[in-house]
Image (spheres, coloured by chain):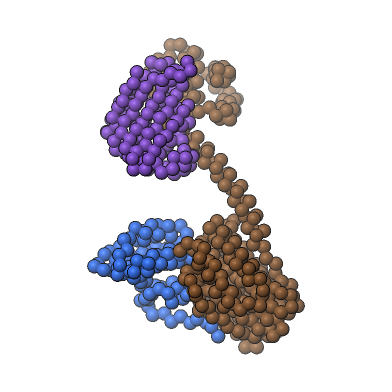
Amino acid sequence: MNINVKFQKDGEVVHGYIDGEIDTYTAPILREELDALEIEKDLLVQLDLSKVSYLDSTGLGIFVAFYKKVVKENAHFKLVGLTARLVRLFEITGLSELMDIETNTKVEYNNESI
Amino acid sequence: MKSTINITTEWDIVTAREIGRNEAKKIGFDTVNQARIATVISELARNIYLYASVGTITIETVEQDGKVGLAITAADQGPGIEDVRAVMQDGFSTSGSIGAGLPGVKRLMDDIEIQSQLKEGTTVRVKKWL
Amino acid sequence: MKELKIQYKKILVDYIENQSERNLYIGQNFIRQLIQKNITPEEVIHMHKQVMEEIFPELPVVSRHGYDFLIEIMVYFGLTLKEHQMLLEQQEEMRIEMNVATKIQSVLLKTTVPQIDEIDIGMLSIPIRKMNGDYVHFLNDEENYVGVAVTDVVGKGVPAALCMSMVKYGLDTLEYAENNPSYVLEVLNRIIEKSVDDSMFVSMFYGRLDLARSIFTYGSAGHEPAIYYNAADNAFYGLGAKGLLLGIMPEMKYEQTEIPLYEGDFIIMMTDGVTEFRHDDKIDSRKIIEQLALTYSHLSAQEMCEKLYEELQKLQEQGLDDDFTVVIFKK
């Protein structure tokens, strides 16, 4: 179990690339990396999750806290490249309604309501 | 007797150890206690060297109520210790800070006093009685 | 110390005269005593050096230097050893406290599964660690309604357990089983949003059964959809609903949906510990749960819960890695 986080600043956009599994053990590492980012007004933080094979609720918590921080600073936050599995997680938890999420592979999620 | 050693390089730690050991021997501490005193000086001086970059170690003989002993004072103008009580607890993670190894230092000596102010510095004074 | 030195000298002399296993054994027992008396490693070596000098006054000077060197380096060894012992003691203290906390949690979060004629209810909640991050709460006003909240707090261990107490308290203040699920979720969201930090939240499935009309009304706050079996259609449906996790944003609204329950129908409510197969994302766990439920649908709701746990545990190669909670309502 390991995680790798890389950032690349490009003008008003910070691209973050996360690689690995985000769980109870690796989540603190991710939090530290995200906390270290300097958030300025109008900045867009775009996190690429295409290499994230697993995300648990602790990991979701990290994204929620970071989302709130970014919004508070009047900056923007976007998640890109989510796998079908991650999309389902964001859909079920209702977070996809709240956050800006873009998937590479278009996944149609059926809410399964009857 | 009283000597003060400036700690700026790693070799100053060795000098402080040497002076401390000789003094301990002169007062009459046995081999084991000489080793303990040298270890304490080493620990305190290393903390200065690693985390405060500049500071002093003062070694002096002390007398009180007919007892003779050795006092070592480590003083620096480094980052200081946020919570002195916490660093004195075993297992409190202090590695990488000026408070590193203080519970061990306390265990090897008889008395310990710590004064610290964040961003201003730390003074640790320990004594060992004969 | 003097007394110990005399004993040590005798044991050492015995060994030097006769290198028998027995004498070695005596030596090791003696060390046990020294450890109990908190004698440090450098003191032991110092004692050894003194004894050697007494036995062999002509001990070469290089040998003495050797001992002195060993004494010196063992001071540090002793410090580390001592610190290690202290940590073990602290760990033991924490373990005891953790056990007490676990007991308090199980008393605090104890909920009774309602026993009523109109509906057969089963429940099983197994924590992965000592503290459970899942919680099931029943509200029952005997004649008219049964309410059930299936909750999962993000994170595990102590923080989750503390947050859980708040959820329970919130549900307790609602008191009546007839409350609408959307209302219950809104109230709880407000309570949790105000009280916990930004990375903490709760998912909840709330269901209420109107006993007289046999209508099940449910809402969900970011929770794993429940599975509903319709006996007439012989088909399964997911009971999902739009709704954000509790505790993230203030003033959220939650929708609620009604379904009628007929003879032979059942609803499986669960936490993601039941559906999540971490090491195999190709498995459609919900399909497996449906099949298992159908296989065991002749059993009571409680027995169905237990069978589900048993079978799903077998499927997980490395064992379950999350709290596992399942509640079944069976008409």
Q: Looking at the picture, does residue C303 appear above or below residue C49? A: below
Residue B119: x and y, percent?
34, 43
The chain coloured purple is B
The residue under the point 58% across, 65% down is: C167
Residue placed farthest to the top in the image?
C57
Residue A42 appearing in the image: yes
The chain coloured blue is A
Between C249 and A11, the one lying in front of the other is: C249
Name the quarter where the N terminus of chain B is drawn: top left
- Chain C appears what colour? brown
The residue under the point 62% across, 55% down is: C102
Residue placed farthest to the right in the image?
C117
Between C248 and C149, the one lying in front of the other is: C248
Residue C314 appearing in the image: no
| Left or right: C298, with C204 as reference point | right
State the count of labels.
Answer: 0
Q: Looking at the picture, does residue C104 appear above or below residue B77? A: below
Residue B3: x and y, percent?
32, 22
